[in-house]
Image: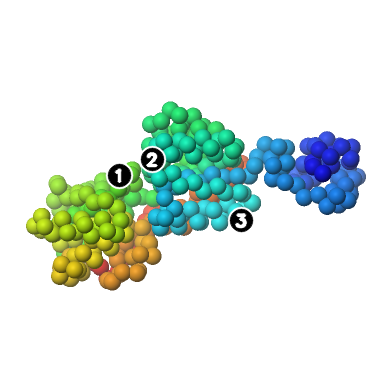
Amino acid sequence: MNIYDIAAEAGVSISTVSRVLNNRGRVKKETQEKIEAVLQKYDYQPSAVARGLVTKSMRTIGILTVDIRVMHYSNTTYILEQALSRLGYNVMVCNTGGLLEENLRYLRMLVEKQVDGLVLVGSVFDDLEQSVEGLEYLRHMPVVLANGSLALDNAYSVLVDDPMGAGLSVRHLHKKGHKDIYYVQDMDTHSAKRKAEGFLKAMRDCGLPAEGRILRSRHGLDEGGAFAKSLLRSGKPFSALVFGEDLTAIGAMKELQRAGLRIPEDVAVTGFNNSDYARMCTPELTSIDNKYRLVGEYSVKLLTGLLEGSGTEADVMIRPVLIERESS
């Protein structure tokens, strides 16, 4: 028994059955009672596919992220998935690895499955703007970027003010008396670049030298340790390090401690994301709270507003805060 059979037995159109099932639109009382009698007779439970055929919506949202194993991405994705599920949406989560060809492959799959909307988690997806194929896929549905942006009429952003966050770390360290401060960039994402720009601006605003103050590392615990070893071998004087991610910062901090440096007495360290890692290390890490929960919640509110016509079509900017702990 399907929606077509229900309509035939009740002697009404499929759209009338749909209005009764979804409690939308006006239906005469006697017609509604007739349809409900048939539904009760066959204990009918509408499938998502059947509902989608009538409403032209599968109530399915695609979430693209880089790597669900990365705590920041997993936290944001969890908030998105839970909030959307509570609102009755089905959610498909895809890990793309950040490579353009994989981004395009997953986008193609989601378009073919006729998802109603997309959330792209991470500024790495800003690069889709350089792909004609990617832009063509994205034009099919409303798109919200969690800390990213695309120049598309149907794309909206919930951005964290990353430059402000990096600036908060610089000003905090400057107040503590630090002058030999360096920023450690461990990713090539747009977010990482914005943090570096914010760091340099804050250094200049504080009257501190900005030239040559950006150092590079790979992302991760071991990579942070390798970076610290290299920095120590270089003989470069430093009193404070500002990292763009917590995990890399902790790796560096552990290696600095192994080398006999005291934190924060000999060198201060700050991270970014205010992840659980920041409270699991010794000393606990000062970090920038970029409010992933708010990013997720606003992304859901913005996307569902676009889909249901109940929201304001506007970008959102989240202001981060510095959480001071023992490392600085």
Report x, y in % for residue 38: 88, 47
Number of other residues with Cα within 10 Å of mark 3, as a class: few under 14, some 14 to 19, many 20 or more = few
Q: CA distance from mark 3 to mark 1?
A: 35 Å
Q: Is residue 10 above or below residue 44?
A: above
Callout 1: helix, strand or loop? loop
Mark 2 and mark 1 lie on one chain; the one further toward the N terminus is: 2
| Residue 99: image tag | 2
What's the residue type where badge 1 is placed?
Asp
Give the residue pinned by disc 3: 86
Task: Look at the image and tell me in which quarter the N terminus lies.
Answer: top right
Q: Could you tell which of marks 2 and 3 lies nearer the N-terminus?
A: 3
The quarter holding residue 101 reads: top left
Q: Provide residue 21's location: percent of width, then percent of height.
A: 77, 46
| Mark 2 or 3: the one toward you | 2
Q: Measuring 40% from the left and 45% from the top, which residue is drawn there?
A: 97
Q: Residue 56 — which label?
A: none
Circle 2 — which element? loop
Is there any visible trace of residue 194 in the rendered image?
no
Q: Is residue 73 left or right of residue 309?
A: left
Mark 1: give few (<14), some (14-19) or many (20+) Cα within 10 Å.
few
233 or 292: nearer the viewer: 233
- Farthest residue, direction left: 235
Q: Residue at x 35, y 69 (%)?
A: 279
Q: Residues within 10 Å of mark 2 (few under 14, many from 20)?
A: few
Mark 2 vs mark 3, CA separation in Å: 31 Å
Circles 2 and 3 in contact, beta carbons < 8 Å: no
Q: Amino acid at mark 2?
A: Leu
Q: Which residue is mark 1?
A: 188
Q: Callout 3, which amino acid?
A: Arg
Q: Mark 3 touching mark 1, by CB under 8 A?
A: no
